């Protein structure tokens, strides 16, 4: 056990005053300790996992949702923050109406939904992704679409980054329902009280 | 854990997750155990080898389950089955 003095101001009061004063100082000391304990407890990480999903590659998105699903099953609170290409994992439909030319081009070059996600290696214009999906099916691995739905059912929080969604011209109506909107502070507020945080 | 004779365990419910891969055995087990009352025991039958470590990790991280035992069996087709006995504690 360490014998380092505790930095409690009430201690010096006890040391310098008489016995009667010490007895009076005791409730005060307890109150100070309780306040300290409460403050420390508020800083202990919670059973929480947070993720930044930056990539829109099928394999990486799949990994993100496998971890999210596993964590949720283990009783962890899970929060996923989707930014830039990661937003493609939340796409449900493509809309062109009301978009600027660059936004339209971006929308046309991006997958309309998760079915169009490519793989990070050996994609060959989507052939690699189709092959991976086929191989996963043969091995009875749950598809990314099923995993996303499952995660949503298990209460995994999905937050889309307002700024990157705006830059890429993605309308909230193009994303799956139940997706929240947030910024860096929304992610950090969750990450700061998590035991695990990942950037995918 | 694991030293308990699995035949003596009073199983309240069985969950068959044969053929399912990571993370599905865990996800299904979690869903099933939440439907059971505290103290009840769930037996999970899996073909996923990774589920052995996964269930150990789950029991370690979660505060509402205990892993009573794990065992291996070979089915009639020669396939290895991984059995997990999980009790809801909270």
Image: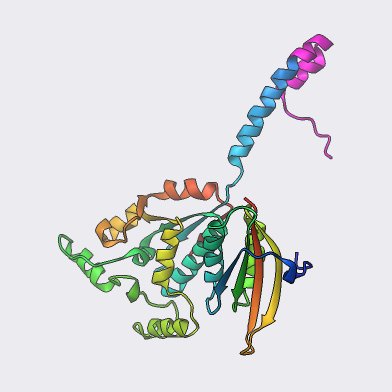
Could you say which is closer to the camera, residue A91 or residue B32?
B32
Q: Along the line of sight, which residue is nearer the eye, A33 or A138?
A: A138
Query: Which part of the image, by quadrant, shows the N terminus of chain B?
Result: bottom right
The answer to whether A18 appears left or right of A34 in the picture is right
Residue at horizontal 46 percent and vertical 71 percent from the top? A62
The residue depicted at 48 percent of the width and 58 percent of the height is A51
Picture layout, residue A192 above or below residue B68: above
| Magenta region includes residue A107 | no
- Identify the residue at horizontal 38%, vertical 77% (top origin): A118
Hey, which quadrant is residue B16 in on the image? bottom right
The colour scheme used to paint the residues is: rainbow
Residue A190 at x, y = what percent?
49, 48
What residue is shown at x 45% (from left), y 50% (from top)? Answer: A187
Tell me residue A34's x, y (percent).
66, 28
Left or right: A132 as drawn, with respect to B80: left
Name the image quarter holding residue B22: bottom right
Q: Which residues are magenta?
A: A1-24
**Residue A78 percent coordinates (x, y):** 49, 55
| Residue A18 visible in the snapshot | no
Image vertical order of residue B59 relative to residue A19, above or below: below
In the image, farthest residue toward the left: A98
- Residue A141: x and y in percent read 48, 77
* Quadrant position of residue A97: bottom left
The answer to whether B34 appears left or right of A12 in the picture is left
Query: Taking the image as drawn, is residue B71 in sight?
Result: yes
Q: Is A3 within the magenta?
A: yes
């Amino acid at each position: 056990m360490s014998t380092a003095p505790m930095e409690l101001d009430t201690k010096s009061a006890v040391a310098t005053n008489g016995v009667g004063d010490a007895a009076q100082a005791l409730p005060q000391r307890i109150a100070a300790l309780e306040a300290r304990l409460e403050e420390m407890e508020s800083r202990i990480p919670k059973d929480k996992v947070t993720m930044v999903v930056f990539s829109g590659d099928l394999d990486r998105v799949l990994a993100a949702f496998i971890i999210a699903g596993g964590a949720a099953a283990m009783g962890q609170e899970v929060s996923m923050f989707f930014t830039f290409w990661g937003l493609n994992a939340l796409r449900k439909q493509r809309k062109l109406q009301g978009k600027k030319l660059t936004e339209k081009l971006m929308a046309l070059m991006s997958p309309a939904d998760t079915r169009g996600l490519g793989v990070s290696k050996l994609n060959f214009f989507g052939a690699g992704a189709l092959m991976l999906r086929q191989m996963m099916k043969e091995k009875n691995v749950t598809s990314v679409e099923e995993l996303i739905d499952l995660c949503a059912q298990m209460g995994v929080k999905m937050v889309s980054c307002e700024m990157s969604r705006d830059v890429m011209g993605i309308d909230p109506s193009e994303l799956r329902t139940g997706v929240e909107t947030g910024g860096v502070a929304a992610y950090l507020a969750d990450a700061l009280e998590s035991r695990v945080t990942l950037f995918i | 854990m694991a030293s308990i004779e699995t035949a003596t365990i009073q199983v309240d419910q069985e969950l068959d997750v044969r053929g399912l891969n990571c993370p599905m055995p865990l996800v299904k087990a979690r869903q099933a155990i939440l439907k059971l009352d505290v103290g009840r025991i769930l037996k999970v039958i899996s073909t996923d080898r990774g589920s052995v470590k996964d269930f150990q990790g789950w029991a370690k991280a979660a505060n509402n389950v205990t892993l009573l035992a794990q065992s291996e069996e070979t089915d009639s087709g020669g396939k290895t089955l991984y059995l997990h006995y999980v009790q809801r504690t909270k």
